[in-house]
Image: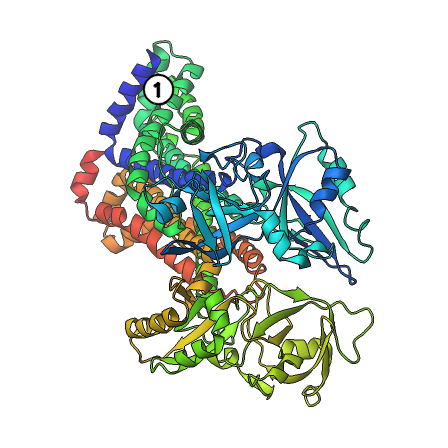
Amino acid sequence: MMIFHALRTTFRNLFRHKTNAAVNILSLTIGLTSAIFIFLWILDEYGFDKFHPNDKELYQVLINQTFPDGQVHTYGATPAKLKEAILSEIPEVNKITITNMASMQLLQFGEVSFQEVGIYADPDWFSIFNFPIIHGDPSKPLPAINSIAISQKLADKLFGKTDPIGKTVQIEQTQEFMVSAVFADVPLHSRIQFEYVAPFEVYYQENPWMQGWGTGGTNTYVTLDPKASLPAVNQKLERLINSNCEDCTTSPFLYGFSKLYLNGKFEGGKNVGGRIDQVMLFGAVAGIILLMACINFMNLATASAASRSKEVSVRKIIGANRSGLVVHFMLESLILAFLGFLLAILLVQLLLPFFNTITSKSIQLDIFDPLFLGGAIMITLVCGLLAGIYPAIFLSSFKPLTIFQRNAGSLLTGSGLRKTLVVIQFASAVILMVGSIIIYQQINYISNKDLGFNKSQVLVIDQNKNLIANTAPFKNAMLQLSTVDNIGFGGSDIYVIPITTTEIEWPGKPNDASIHFKLFRSDAGFIPTLGIEMIQGRNFVGQNQDSLHYIINRKAMEVMGIPEDEVIGSELDVWGHKGKIVGVTADFHNDNLKVGIEPLVFLYSENLGAYYFVKVNQPASMAEALAGIEKVFKTYSPDYPFEFTFLDELFERQYRSDLVMGKLSLSFMVIAILISCLGLFGLSTFTAARKTKELGIRKVMGASSFNLVLLLCRDFTKLVLVSILIGSPIAWYLAKSYLSGFAFHVDISWVTFLLSGLGLLAVALISVGFQSLKASLTNPTHSLRSE
């Protein structure tokens, strides 16, 4: 009965105070829409790798490697021999599986061929991970050394509608496997993506270098006994490598498999966060936006208290107690919150494709999903209770005798809390505004930063077996194309060069030095193709003698302490291969911009590595260039599909999470400003209504409309200025913390704060000024008559 009565009263007040209702519902709807979007994004982030039933017992073996200078690097590459040692030494381990590093290879069936990402794993792979077998024997998906399990998607591509079981496929034209199982397509929420699984034993036999304890060519995963103590297991595991390899400085440990997606950043051997930082940041943003929407409700409810004062008095006179009134007003608040929730769900459904585009996700809205529905209702309840608690207490405190003896307008004294809430609201808007601008500036800085090489109009083509056999004629044919400027071979990703070592010697190297160098294999064409500047010596010349020649960057020359006029001809020993430095390049970015430029050594290689880099002429038509390049590619590599990426696209992928963060920040900045201005608009409406008589008298006494607008805007302007003064230092501190994560970043300029403050003030004045101008233009005779 009480709920029905609250519903009737709520809707009666909505129609009676349309402006107030519109501002409240719109603020709550916008706030809840933002919170629901962030909640969906957070659920999606937390959903990675959580589909395995044994999630709580599933771990990945990570390695801490300690260097002579005390630095500790953490990574997931483990020695293959570690598996047998774990099985024999650690009884708490139930199951264990190892794989090679996932790689893309050519799969063929008859005339059909595709390049697909796959792994080599041992038989326990499918019993540890939840990748269901849908065709074949689930208990023995890889029954023989020549067996292969493929995904449903790959089965459809290779075999169409025919039964794939028993069919023979080739990998890289050298290995033949019989399809023994088909597994369900790997979910998008899996960090490990693959289309086929072949027996690890095949890979192990073909790569004898993996048989030493000092290697790191596998990933190792285990499940523990549920009763096992993780610290005790890690204590046993810690010295397992060192006890078998005295020279090794690596120590393994177990880390929750599903935790790595969000908590995959390690420093000094300890976890220091990762993507979880972004999740927490946007969770805080959702809270701030909801709080701002609740502040609007509280301010408008208390500011319009006079209009409901007699209602409260009558209710008390006929027997209502204060607790009953509090419950009644709280129910009104919750009804409005759930009305906003219903509208928010509609908005989310409409805007979800746009949100997915921004975040590069494929989120689906399942309203009846228990986790989503429970979370969304909880958010709405908190919002409704937070918004309604103070107005309910405030309104229920009115004394009937006081109401009937005094003008209800006198109840609007004590507006200090409302002013405080407005200051909090706009200070939050300042923080979000400055933060969003700084993030946008940083992303723009990254996108346009001179990396020390030219990434424009450069195609990246994967190395393959055919091209290795035809390296020289393939490159010569490419150079004959009028649309191609140059072609070079590079051993790995140029943006984040993965190979590092401390095993480099040079004359005068200190005995205790432990300097990390990046190693990059390339041919004579790579440096000119990317336009990397040579500052000393020469480039590789493409002859066999270059196998004993090295090129270094300026950073390497500086850390080695070799004078610039002595560097050419200096001896250098890399992994026991003695040679001479023949050239020095200018520094260019060879790692994530969050890290900085690292010392680098180029090793000469014609085809030992991953990619060909093809520079296309600037005036050339890209379609024409691609057609010519594909024709040459197919001439020397007819069995492989012509696949490529652009170098600048690879750069964008590397900073995709930062780009998403920037887009979301800008979106939520606009929302925060909108909610704040809606609140000011509502408050200015009530202020103007409360001062109707005062404005009429001032106008009769000769005040101009401009003076009246200034009068009404003055108090709000003061509040916004105080908000700017409070929010700016907080925004500066947070911006500084964010930028500290980048080795190269923009400077925090006072201009950003000035423009943010002026922009926010201007938008606020427009919101208040509209109602102020409307009130100032009212005929004073009407104003005085209304009183």
Residue pictured at 40% horizontal, 42% vertical: 164
Point out the image quarter for the C terminus: top left
Whether residue 686 appears in this view of the structure is no
Type of amino acid at the residue the image marks with label 1 = Val
* Residue farthest to the bottom, as pictured: 565
Residue 413: x and y in percent read 41, 34
In the image, residue 256 sits, relative to residue 485, either above or below, namely: above
Occupied quadrant, residue 33: top left
Q: Is residue 753 left or right of residue 225?
A: left
The total number of labels drawn is 1
**Which residue is labeled 1 in the image?**
312
Q: Is residue 717 above or below residue 407?
A: below
The residue at the point 69 percent across, 78 percent down is 558
> Where does the N terminus fall, quadrant-wise?
top left
Which residue in the rendered view is the most extreme toward the top? 319
Residue 738, percent across and down?
55, 56
Q: Secondary structure at mark 1?
A: helix
Considering only vertical position in the picture, is 666 above or below 339?
Answer: below
**Is residue 145 something one can see in this rendering?**
yes
Q: Report crowding for label 1: few under 14, some 14 to 19, many 20 or more residues within 10 A (C-alpha).
A: many
Where residue 481 sits, quadrant-wise, is bottom left
Image location of residue 542, percent across then percent down: 55, 83
Of residues 14 and 745, the one nearer the viewer is 745
Residue in the image at 30% along x and 15% along y: 4
263 and 19: which is toward the camera = 263
